[in-house]
Amino acid sequence: MAREEANRFNILDQPHFFDGAVALLGPERDQFLRDYKFDITPTTDDRPYFFDFFKWRALPELLERRALGIALLDCGSDRTLKTYEEIASITIGSVCVAARADFKAISGPVASKISTLRATSSR
């Protein structure tokens, strides 16, 4: 099939689907897979699932395109980002609460016991 015969049903400014198929079947397959915005490599026994296809290095460009109305970023990726954001805020909050509780415990009655122990051990 010639490039000019493509782009009949999915009409785009360029025959991107045809170019992608030719790249995948041709000698520049590895370069195409490396540069593509998503991980479309075939599954293997070590990676048997299709759903983990997002390439994080493509995130800035995908968000920029989404702001322009070109939605290449599915809502699942948005949910993943929100989940990571929530996990980070809960973790930071928990660490702050735990550190404050430890500080209060040391500055209370335990602190006087520690200072007493230090004074007796320095004699």
Image (cartoon, helix red, strand yellow):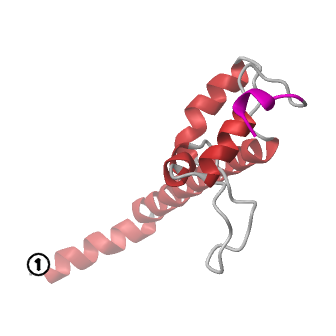
On screen, residue 93 above or below 78: below
In the displayed image of the protein, which residue is found farthest to the front?
Answer: 1
Instruction: Report the residue that reaches farthest toward the left.
Output: 123
What span is in magenta? 1-8
Residue 15 relative to residue 118: left or right = right
Q: Amino acid at mark 1?
A: Ser
Q: Nearer the viewer, residue 37 or 102?
A: 37
Give residue 20's position: percent from left, percent from top. Answer: 66, 42
Residue 73 in the figure: left or right of residue 22: right
The total number of labels drawn is 1
- Most prominent secondary structure in the magenta stretch? loop
Residue lying at the far right in this picture: please name it. Answer: 9
Horizontal and vertical percent position of residue 69: 77, 20
Give the residue drawn at x 71%, y 50%.
80
- Quarter of the figure with the N terminus: top right
Residue 22: x and y in percent read 65, 45
Q: Residue at x 51, y 49 (%)?
A: 28
Name the quadrant containing residue 61: top right
**Residue 104 coordinates in the image, percent (x, y):** 48, 58
Viewer-side residue, 75 vs 10: 10
Asked which secondary structure carries label 1, the reply is: loop
Q: Nearer the viewer, residue 91 or 104?
A: 91
Dot 1, how many residues are within 10 Å of its Cα: few (below 14), some (14-19), or many (20+)?
A: few
Q: Name the residue: 75% across, 24% down.
A: 70
Please say if 107 is above or below 10. Answer: below
- Judge whether 15 appears above or below 18 on screen: above
Residue receiving disc 1: 122
Residue 62 belongs to the span the image colors magenta:
no
